Image (tube, grey):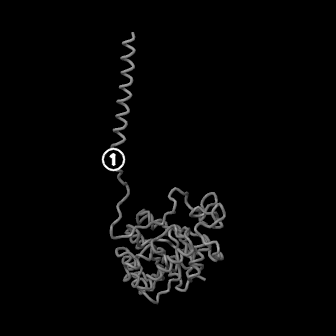
């Protein structure tokens, strides 16, 4: 009996040792590489998207607030964080008057019966020339919200936009969705750098508008934009074309949702925008039959 007990104990000890050795060996083997399921971005094209800064956050309400009262970027409806401080804000910065009908006093309509088409994220060497060609064919003037680094890379396209009579809008240097949460000094530096890139291409161009990437407005970014003489520009109709839904869905959204005074948001850069170009060709005859399409006034909104 004693011999059998001894054998049993030895067996259990050996099993435990073998199990520990196996676990140690597994821990030393590297995990297999994780493969991205997303599409690869072209190396010669900047990729942007106007999705909210927090992908897990619920969609914004029409007034720019999140369900439950939070505004884009996790602030309360008055532009402050739950603790009372504006994220990244200079506490001494003046807060602008709510002069517009969009979030944080931005402008979400033209204020007239005219409809304004706007194009974000460019210029892009593939899609911006196509958009300009379509607009030229129909005699339509629009507003282009340009990204500073793209204006620097493609100054000839900035000149083409201006030469065709379109209005320019600042869209930050690198499509920084979180720009409104940064200090007022950094916000100002970003907007000035973008305007400088535009003026390097077209020295006399007026840049009378600023559009916050992703629509993630805060009082500080509105205040800085207005301090630099730019009207904060939101939108009425969001085509969600940055999600690449296809020309049919983009066309349907515009024809269904556009009314007098609408500002329509589209993109001529930041990804595959062929669907937007094709939708533009489809939608313009309908829009022209119902509305007068105009670029936003070059001297800014009143």
**Residue 108, can we see it?**
no
Is residue 130 visible in the rendered structure shown here? yes
Residue 278 x/y as whole percent: 39, 70
Rendering coords of residue 104 (x, y %): 62, 71
Q: Is residue 95 above or below residue 248?
A: below
On the image, the x and y values in percent for residue 181 come to: 56, 68
Q: Residue furthest bottom?
A: 204
Helix, strand, or loop for circle 1? loop
The quadrant in which the C terminus is found is: bottom right
Residue drawn at 46 percent across, 78 percent down:
144
Identify whether 161 is placed above or below 244. below
Nearest the viewer among 145 and 220 is: 220
Label 1 CA crowd tier, 10 Å (few <14, some 14–19, many 20+): few
Question: Front-most of 264 and 147?
Answer: 147
Residue at numbered disc 1: 32
Q: Position of residue 146 (x, y in %)?
A: 45, 77
Q: Is residue 222 left or right of residue 26?
A: right
Nearer to the camera, 83 or 210: 83
């Amino acid at each position: 009996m004693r011999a059998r007990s001894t054998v049993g104990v030895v067996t259990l000890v050996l099993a435990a040792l073998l199990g520990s050795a196996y676990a140690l060996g597994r821990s030393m083997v590297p995990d297999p590489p994780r493969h991205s399921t997303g599409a690869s971005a072209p190396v010669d094209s900047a990729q942007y998207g106007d999705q909210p800064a927090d992908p897990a956050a619920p969609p914004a309400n029409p007034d720019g607030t999140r369900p439950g009262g939070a505004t884009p970027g996790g602030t309360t409806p008055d532009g402050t964080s739950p603790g009372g401080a504006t994220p990244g804000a200079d506490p001494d910065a003046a807060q602008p008057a709510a002069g517009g009908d969009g979030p944080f006093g931005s402008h979400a309509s033209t204020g007239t019966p005219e409809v304004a088409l706007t194009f974000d994220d460019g210029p892009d060497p593939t899609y911006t020339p196509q958009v300009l060609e379509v607009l030229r064919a129909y005699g339509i003037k629009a507003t282009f919200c340009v990204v500073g680094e793209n204006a620097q890379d493609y100054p000839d396209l900035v000149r083409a936009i201006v030469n065709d009579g379109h209005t320019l809008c600042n869209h930050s240097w690198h499509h920084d969705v979180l720009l409104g949460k940064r200090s007022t000094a950094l916000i100002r530096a970003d907007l000035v750098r973008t305007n400088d890139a535009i003026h390097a291409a077209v020295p006399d161009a007026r840049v009378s508008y600023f559009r916050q990437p992703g629509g993630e407005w805060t009082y500080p970014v509105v205040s800085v934009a207005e301090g630099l003489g730019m009207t904060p520009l939101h939108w009425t109709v969001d085509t969600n074309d940055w999600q690449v839904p296809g020309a049919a869905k983009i066309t349907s959204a515009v024809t269904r949702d556009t009314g007098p005074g609408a500002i329509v948001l589209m993109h001529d850069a930041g990804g595959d925008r062929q669907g937007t170009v094709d939708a533009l060709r489809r939608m313009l005859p309908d829009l022209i039959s119902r509305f007068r399409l105009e670029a936003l006034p070059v001297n800014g909104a009143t």
